[in-house]
Amino acid sequence: MSVFKYSVIRFRPFAETEEFANIGVIVTRVMDGKIGYKLAPRRFTRIRQFFDQLAYDAYDDVISYLQIELGRAAEYLPTFSTMDGLAIFNDVTRRRESSVLFSNPRVTEHDMDLEEIVEKFYDRFVKRENVTYSREESLVKDIRRELRRAGINYFKSVKLNDDVVPVSFPLAYQGAELRAIKPLAFSQKSPMSVLDHGAHWRRRLGLLLDRRRISPGNVLLAVEPPPAGADISTMEAFDVARKDLDALPFKVIDVRDGSYVNQDVINFAKHSVEAKPFFR
C-alpha cells in the first residue's frame, strides 16, 4: 500500500467568472517522490462546448505549456535538481494567478502503481465531465423530439455572447426576451463532482441575471438525478445541489416523469412561443 498526493489541473480562461474545466491530473508517490500526470487532448471539445472560441484558442497554448512544464517536473528536475519529488510537486501545484489552476493537493492510499493511479484520477475528474455532457446532449435530443411532436419547432441553440459570461443554451427561443430550457444531468461519479456541477450552473446563471442577460422565470432547469443505485453520499450531494439551484428565480423540475419527458417542459415551451417567431 502506497501513499499518493495528487492535484486536479484546471483551465480558467476568465478570472471574472471563476469558472473552470478540469483538464488533467498530477500525482506524486510520497515514498519515492516519483511524479506522474495526464492531460486532456489539445482538441478537447469540452472546452469548445463550455467556453467561447477565444478560450478554446487559448487552451491550445495552455496544453502546450503544461506538456513542457510537467514533463520537466516528472522527468528532469528530480534528476538534475537538489529538490526531491514531493518538493517539486508542491512547487508546481502552488497557487498562482494564471488561467491554469491546481486544486488543493489531496492525499490517498492505494496498492496501485503510479501509472494506474494517474489513469484512475484522470477518469474520475476529467472523463466524467465528458460523460456528463454526453448525458445532457441525450436529454437535449429527447426534449427536442418531444417539442416537435407537440408542434413546437422554434427552440434552437442560442449563444449569449456576453463579454464576461458567454453561454450557449441548446434549447432556447429568442422572442422579446430569451426563454431557455437547460437540462442538467447529475451523473458524476463522486459527491463532490455533483456539488461542483450544481454550483457551477448556480454561479453562471446568477451572473447572467446580475448582468440582465436573462430574466427571472425565463429559464427552466430540467434536472436528471444521479442514476439508480447511486450511494447515499451522492444522493445527499444531489439534494444540496438541487436546493442551491432552487434559490434561483427559475423553476427547477425533474426532466422525466417516469419514462417520459416531463409535461412541464412542454408547457414551458408552449408559453414561450409567440404567434410569430422572431430571432435576433
Image: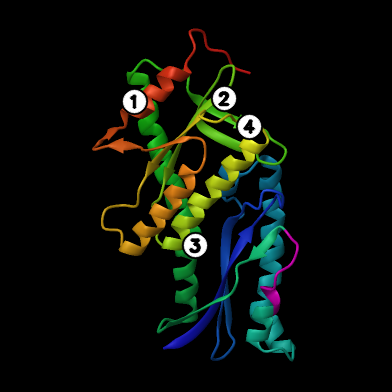
In the picture, the disc for residue 178 is 2
- Is 240 situated above or below 119? above
Which of the pair 138/44 is nearer the observer? Answer: 138
Quarter holding the N terminus is bottom left
Q: Earlier in the sequence, mark 2 or mark 1?
A: 1
Type of the residue with mark 2:
Leu
Q: Are marks 3 and 2 in contact (CB under 8 Å)?
A: no
- Amino acid type assigned to the residue bearing label 3 in the image: Phe
Q: Earlier in the sequence, mark 3 or mark 2?
A: 3
Measured Cα–Cα span from mark 3 to mark 2:
33 Å
Do residues under tags 2 and 4 come within 8 Å of each other at their CB atoms? yes
Residue 146: give its label: 1
Return the mark for residue 160: 4
Label 3 neighbour load within 10 Å: few <14, some 14-19, many 20+: many
Q: Which residues are magenta?
A: 91-98
Is 110 on the left-hand or right-hand side of 101? left
- Pinpoint residue 176: horizontal percent, then vertical percent: 59, 17
Q: Considering only order in the chain, which callout, 4 or 3, is on the residue closer to the N terminus?
A: 3
Q: Nearer the viewer, mark 3 or mark 2?
A: 2
Which mark, by number, is residue 125? Answer: 3
Q: Nearer the viewer, mark 3 or mark 4?
A: 4
